[in-house]
C-alpha cells in the first residue's frame, strides 16, 4: 500500500508541475528524473513500517541546508534576498533539510523567470543535497541551465566544481575552482573559502598521483 501511495504522489506531483505551474516542456525531463530518483531512493532506503528518522538526522540535514543557502547567497551576484516568493520559500525548506520539496519550488521559480540563474542554481543544489552529494542527471541538467543563463556565475563554478570533485572527477573540479579564483576580485567574499578548498583538493590529487606511481 505504501508503494501505491508513493507512486501516486509522484505522478500527482509531475502533473501538478506541468499542468498547474506550467513547467516548460524543456524541464519535463529534469522533473521526471527528480521524481524517478526520489522513487529509487525510497526503494533503497524506504522502510514505511518503521518509525520516523531520528531527530539527530533531521537536525543534521537542517544544518547542512543552512550552509547550502548561506553559501549560495554569498556567491550570488544579485540581491541577497530573491524577489521570487517561490525561491524564498524554497530556501526556507532547504534550511529545514527538505531538499526535494525545495527543488520543486525552486523549479517553479525558474518557470516564473527562465533567466533566473540563482533559481536554476538552487534547483541544482537541492537536487544534489537530496541525493546525498551524488551528481544525478537531474542535478547536472539544472547546473547546465544555470550555465546557459549565466556562464560566469561564481555559484555555478563553486558548486559544480564541488560536485565534480566529490563524484570522482577532482581534476575537473579543480579546473573550475582555479578559474573562479583567477577571475574573482581580491575582496570577493567567497575567495578565502575557495582557496582553502582548492588547497585541500590539490593535496588529494597529489596524494592520488603519488599512490599511482
Image (spheres, grey):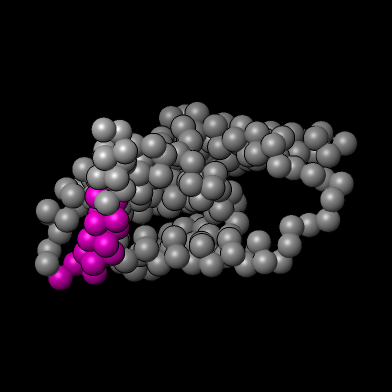
Is residue 205 something one can see in this rendering? no
Asked whether, in this view, residue 179 is left or right of residue 2, the answer is: left
**Figure disc tally:** 0
Answer above or below: position of 120 versus 199. Answer: above
Quadrant for the N terminus, please.
top right
Magenta stretch: give its range.
187-202
Quadrant for the C terminus, please.
top left
Q: Residue at x 44, y 60 (%)?
A: 68
Residue 43, given in percent of the width and then of the height, sits at 72, 35
- Res. 208 image quadrant: top left
Asked whether, in this view, residue 91 is left or right of residue 147, the answer is: right
Q: Is residue 162 magenta?
A: no
Q: Residue at x 58, y 40 (%)?
A: 17
Q: Is residue 189 magenta?
A: yes
**Between residues 106 and 46, which one lies in front from this camera angle?**
46
**Between residues 116 and 128, which one lies in front from this camera angle?**
128
Answer above or below: position of 6 versus 105. Answer: above
- Res. 9 image quadrant: top right
Residue 31, given in percent of the width and then of the height, sits at 54, 35
**Between residues 59 and 204, which one lies in front from this camera angle?**
204
Is residue 133 something one can see in this rendering? yes
Answer above or below: position of 73 versus 205. Answer: below
Dominant SS of magenta comes to helix
Residue 194, given in percent of the width and then of the height, sits at 26, 59
Q: Residue at x 31, y 38 (%)?
A: 211
**Between residues 177 and 106, which one lies in front from this camera angle?**
177
Asked whether, in this view, residue 162 is left or right of residue 25, the answer is: left
Residue 155, given in percent of the width and then of the height, sits at 30, 54
Answer above or below: position of 24 versus 200. Answer: above
Q: Residue at x 54, y 47 (%)?
A: 132
Amino acid at each position: 500500500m505504501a508503494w501505491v501511495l508513493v507512486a501516486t504522489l509522484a505522478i500527482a506531483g509531475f502533473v501538478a508541475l506541468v499542468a498547474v505551474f506550467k513547467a516548460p516542456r524543456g524541464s519535463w525531463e529534469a522533473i521526471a528524473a527528480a521524481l524517478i530518483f526520489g522513487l529509487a531512493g525510497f526503494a533503497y532506503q524506504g522502510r514505511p513500517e518503521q518509525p520516523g528518522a531520528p531527530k539527530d538526522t533531521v537536525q543534521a540535514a537542517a544544518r547542512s541546508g543552512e550552509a547550502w543557502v548561506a553559501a549560495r547567497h554569498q556567491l550570488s551576484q544579485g540581491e541577497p534576498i530573491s524577489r521570487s516568493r517561490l525561491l524564498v520559500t524554497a530556501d526556507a525548506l532547504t534550511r529545514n533539510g527538505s531538499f526535494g520539496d525545495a527543488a520543486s519550488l525552486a523549479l517553479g521559480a525558474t518557470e516564473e523567470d527562465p533567466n533566473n540563474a540563482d533559481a536554476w542554481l538552487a534547483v541544482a543544489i537541492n537536487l544534489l543535497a537530496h541525493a546525498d552529494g551524488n551528481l544525478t542527471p537531474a542535478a547536472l541538467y539544472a547546473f547546465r541551465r544555470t550555465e546557459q543563463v549565466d556562464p560566469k556565475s561564481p555559484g555555478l563554478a563553486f558548486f559544480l566544481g564541488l560536485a565534480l570533485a566529490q563524484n570522482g572527477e577532482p581534476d575537473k573540479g579543480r579546473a573550475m575552482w582555479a578559474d573562479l579564483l583567477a577571475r574573482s576580485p581580491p575582496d570577493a567574499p567567497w575567495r578565502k573559502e575557495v582557496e582553502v578548498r582548492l588547497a585541500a583538493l590539490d593535496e588529494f590529487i597529489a596524494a592520488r598521483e603519488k599512490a599511482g606511481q
